[in-house]
Amino acid sequence: MTIFEQAPNTSSTNRPVKLVYFAWVRERIGVPQEEIALPSSVVTVRDLLHWLKERGEGYEHALQFPEVIRVALDHEHAEHDEPLGDAREIGLFPPMTGG
Amino acid sequence: MTIKPVIRVQANDFDIAREIELATAGHPEIGAVVTFSGICRDDGGSLAALELEHYPGMAERAINEIALQAAERWPLQAITAIHRYGRVTPGENIVLVLAASAHRQAAFDGAAFLMDFLKSKAPFWKKLIARDGSDGGWVDAKESDDEALQRWSAAEGFERS
């Protein structure tokens, strides 16, 4: 990764993002989407999953095994070590089962 | 030659013969069309329906990206991918993938590639609805689906001709 990896987030404390949930992630959290202000300590996808998990029982249930959760930043698949960057919409969902 | 894949995410059924006509019209160079259709099965009579959920916006985008990768890899003249959402009952269509080329090998490989990636990379999820109307839970992703992707990276280049 580049040395600028964390730069976009240092200036965006409590940045509001739209979180959208699908399948059993949606059912367990209990809402299809929500606007949340992320603290500046949440930099990567993995940070987000661990931070969300502490928000209550539904989140704890949905994100019990954060490593299996798939995440999309503005409709693009993202790895867990990727920075959230300037993403406005973040999708959280289980492994896909289409086709 | 750059092609524009036809990608549709829709609640309604589709007509495979019609999609072949649309894909091949005006392309006399096409000599091979491969279609794959995924159909809802009844799992020995226990399944009443599947409820297909998708991520609107991302679903179309993800399938389009897969189609463009296929177009880069094989000499394809047409690509169509249609995926349904909502309630689908046994015997009904779920998904259609079509790849057309001058010769069969590119069409076969392109269609298989599209389908393998669509299963693991396109944001769709299946919920089982049991005969008695109860929620049968979400279908689990299979490890074999991820393994299916590996053959395409391991064999880079072999299918170009």
Image: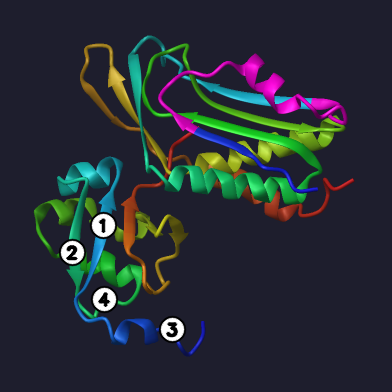
Q: Earlier in the sequence, mark 1 or mark 3?
A: 3
The magenta span reads B9-32
Q: Crowding at label 4, few (<14), some or many (≥20) Cα neighbours within 10 Å? A: some
The disc at residue B96 is none
Disc 3 and disc 4 in contact, CB within 8 angstroms? no
Residue occupied by mark 3: A5
Locate residue A45, reporting x and y percent.
35, 68
Give the secondary structure at mark 2. strand
Residue A19, numbered label: 1
Where residue B117 sits in the image (x, y, percent)? 58, 44
- The picture places residue A97, in percent across and down from the top left corner, at 43, 38
The answer to whether residue B121 shows anywhere in this view is no
The chain letter under disc 2 is: A
- Chain hosting mark 1: A
In percent of the image, x 26 and y 76: which residue is there? A42
Report the amino acid beneath label 1. Leu
Q: Can marks 1 and 2 be said to lie on one chain?
A: yes
- The residue tagged 4 is A42
Picture layout, residue B31 above or below residue B156 = above
Q: Amino acid at mark 3?
A: Glu
Query: What chain does badge 4 belong to?
Result: A
Could one spot residue A5 in this view of the protein?
Answer: yes
Amino acid at the residue labelled 2: Ile
Badges 1 and 3, same chain: yes
Q: Which residue is mark 2?
A: A36
Same subunit, labels 3 and 4: the answer reads yes
Earlier in the chain: of badge 3 and badge 2, it is: 3
Mark 1–mark 2 distance (CA, rounded to whole Å): 7 Å
Disc 1 to disc 4, C-alpha distance: 14 Å
- Name the chain letter of the residue that bears numbered label 3: A
Report, in whole angstroms, how far the alpha carbon at label 1 lies from the one at label 3.
22 Å
Q: Quadrant of the C terminus of chain B?
A: top right
